[in-house]
Image (cartoon, rainbow, N blue to C red):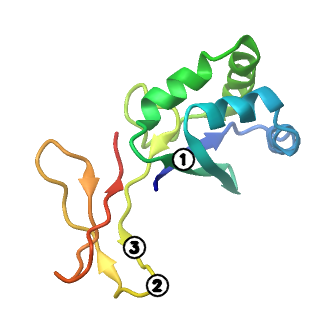
């Protein structure tokens, strides 16, 4: 089982940045890929629209993405070099919280085959866990949008 997290960041507003970013991601360094797998990333996709990047990450169940990404960034000098290179091409979105680079996005709708469309319940006080609102006969599936 895994948990999906979605993040966003912007590419810097520079004509050469898009091509540099795309070129690097056509050949992601093996050390980076191995480190991501080691810290619990099961799947990662990055999408681009204009300057906005959206990253969808599936983490092994029970793995905190903040802890995992900190471990990843410090796993080797080569990974740290990759992270510095990527940050030189990116900037946090205006909506990011203080200190946040890739800003966590909140889920607002979920549709799954075999269930009716559902809206999300509000998280309980002190929590960022939101669940789709479904009928009582349906299992609750937690979706996390932690900040």
Sequence-wise, which precedes: disc 2 or disc 1?
A: 1
Q: Is residue 93 left or right of residue 49?
A: left
Residue designated by label 2: 113
Q: Which mark is residue 110?
A: 3
The C terminus, quarter of image = top left
Please give the count of numbered marks on the rendered protein. 3
Depth check, mark 3 against mark 2: the one in front is: 2
- The CA span between labels 3 and 2 is 10 Å
Q: In the rendered image of this protein, does residue 124 appear above or below residue 74? A: below
Badge 3 density bin: few <14, some 14–19, many ≥20, Cα 10 Å: some
Q: Secondary structure at mark 1?
A: strand
Residue toward you, 94 or 7: 7
Q: Is residue 11 left or right of residue 109?
A: right
Q: Secondary structure at mark 3?
A: strand
Where in the figure is residue 64, as x and y percent of width and height?
41, 36
Q: Is residue 34 left or right of residue 64?
A: right
Where in the figure is residue 133, as x and y percent of width and height?
23, 74
Badge 2 density bin: few <14, some 14–19, many ≥20, Cα 10 Å: few
Residue toward you, 125 or 21: 125
- The CA span between labels 1 and 3 is 19 Å
Q: In the rendered image of this protein, does residue 19 appear above or below residue 113? A: above
> Residue at left 25%, top 48%?
128
Badge 1 density bin: few <14, some 14–19, many ≥20, Cα 10 Å: many
Where in the figure is residue 32, as x and y percent of width and height?
73, 30
Residue designated by label 1: 8
Sequence-wise, which precedes: disc 1 or disc 3?
A: 1
Residue toward you, 70 or 92: 70
State yes or no: discs 1 and 3 in contact (Cβ < 8 Å).
Answer: no
Q: In the rendered image of this protein, does residue 50 appear above or below residue 102? A: below
> Residue at left 80%, top 44%?
18
- The CA span between labels 2 and 1 is 26 Å
């Amino acid at each position: 089982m895994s948990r999906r997290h979605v993040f966003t960041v912007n590419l810097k507003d520079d004509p050469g940045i898009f091509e540099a970013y795309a070129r690097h991601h056509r050949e992601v360094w093996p050390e980076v890929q191995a480190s991501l797998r080691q810290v619990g990333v099961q799947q990662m996709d990055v999408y681009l629209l204009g300057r906005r990047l959206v990253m969808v990450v599936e983490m092994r169940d029970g793995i905190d993405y903040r802890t995992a990404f900190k471990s990843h960034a410090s796993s080797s000098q080569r990974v740290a070099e990759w992270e510095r290179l990527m940050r030189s091409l990116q900037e946090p979105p205006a909506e990011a919280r203080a200190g946040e680079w890739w800003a966590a996005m909140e889920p607002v709708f979920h549709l799954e085959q075999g269930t009716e469309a559902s809206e999300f319940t509000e998280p309980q006080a002190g929590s960022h866990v939101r669940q789709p609102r479904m009928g009582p006969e349906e299992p609750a599936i937690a979706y996390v949008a932690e900040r």
